[in-house]
Amino acid sequence: MGFQQALSGLDAATSQLDTIGNNIANANTVGFKASTAQFADVFAASLNGSGGDQNGIGTKVSAITQQFSQGNITASNNSLDMAINGQGFFRMSQNGSISYSRDGQFELDKNGNLVNAQGLQLTGYQADTSGNIVTATPVPLNIPTANLSPSATANAVIGLNLDSTTTAPTGATFNPSDPTTFNNSTSLTIYDSLGNSHVATLYFSKDSTVPAAISTATPTASTAWSTYLTIDGNAVPSAGTAIGSLGFNASGSLVYPPATSSLKTGQLQIPITLTNGATSPQQVTLDFSSSSQYGAPFGVNQLTQDGFTSGQLSGFSTSPSGVIQGRYSNGQTKNLGQIVLANFTAPQGLNPLGNSQWAETTSSGPALVGAAATGSLGAIQSGAVESSNVDLTSELVNMITAQRDYQANAQAIKTEDQIQQTLVNLR
């Protein structure tokens, strides 16, 4: 029996050394999870039942378990590198075959797919053309590299203060080239449906009296300003014609134009005629609702519009929830997709496939798939990778222990051999 017991000890120590060696070899493998050899004693079956004086017949490796503890997160120079801070696995696909990984070193292939070094595709929720995440069945993520389509200006917000102490201009008919025909002006850039930019200039001319149409519609209006518009120097709708009026009450608050079924108080909707092939007329809503008339110099507090020209994809960023956002050369951003993560009730039951990949098994339970940073799933850190969780100091100490176990079992075989030789030499 002594030979069998010691031999089982040698086998167990060898398995432990193999496990430790594999851990050490992968100390620098991104996303690697260390394993531990677990042992169990072995007893022979007895017809008389188990007794307290029964000798064991050695040991065996009962399991080699993986330790899914968090590895250190280190920054990288690749914006497509990602680390999971917490529980979960990246969900990878290769021709429909699903595997799972903690290795977040990704890149774009020639077709715009997010892939790892082995060509497996990262899966998630794709975004539609408007940048809305479509939370359906996870699919391989594809990053469109086409130019971002332009968007025509539909709304502009103009927040300003018109000086209540200003007197009406002396000029008779408004003329943008004659500063005596208006009091103040300001400009902003708007865009047409082709992404072409146009300079929109607004002119404000204080009325000497409140027009009857304004006082009838809004009796509280005590002061009125005629508002004119030019696009690239051309008057809208025609030379000398105002696009509307702004009326203020005695407190300096804007009260005209009044609200309608489609517009709020202080909004003017202007049709702009274009002759460059873009959509015409282009309807633009000018929102003056945040404007005021106080006894202070003219000043512009807000000047924004919602249009933009086309842009080229210039970079990516990934949020903790896994949303991949593209940055474009025109200053715009757009959601391109969202990475999903998967978690398991018993991750130790996963089947290791190599290349930092695992496969689902009946022992692991089914994958629980969802967006990052939700439920039990960890958050994604962009521009970083998760290092191996191998503790080299512990592994080297374990190696010394396994070596001593091996030497002790080898000594047991040597001792058993000496005893057997003694018996053979008896006469």
Image: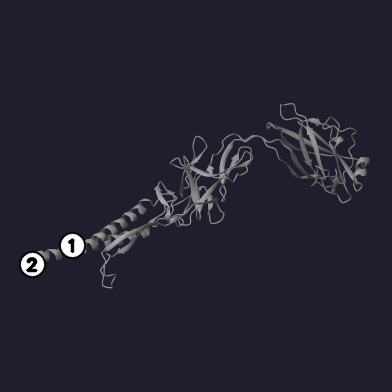
Q: Residue at x 89, y 50 (%)?
A: 250
Q: Position of residue 63 (x, y in %)?
A: 36, 58
Mark 2: secondary structure: loop
Q: Is residue 26 above or below residue 421?
A: above
Q: What mark, if any, has residue 414 been given in the picture?
A: 1
Q: What mark, if any, has residue 141 been given in the picture?
A: none
**Cα distance, mark 2 to mark 1?**
19 Å
Q: Quadrant of residue 331?
A: top right
Q: Which residue is mark 2?
A: 426
Q: Is residue 7 above or below residue 91?
A: below
Q: Position of residue 146 (x, y in %)?
A: 58, 34
Nearer the observer, 346 or 142: 346
Q: Residue furthest front?
A: 47
Nearer the observer, 302 or 336: 336
Q: Position of residue 328 (x, y in %)?
A: 60, 38
Q: Position of residue 358 (x, y in %)?
A: 43, 49
Residue 217 placement, left or right of 339: right
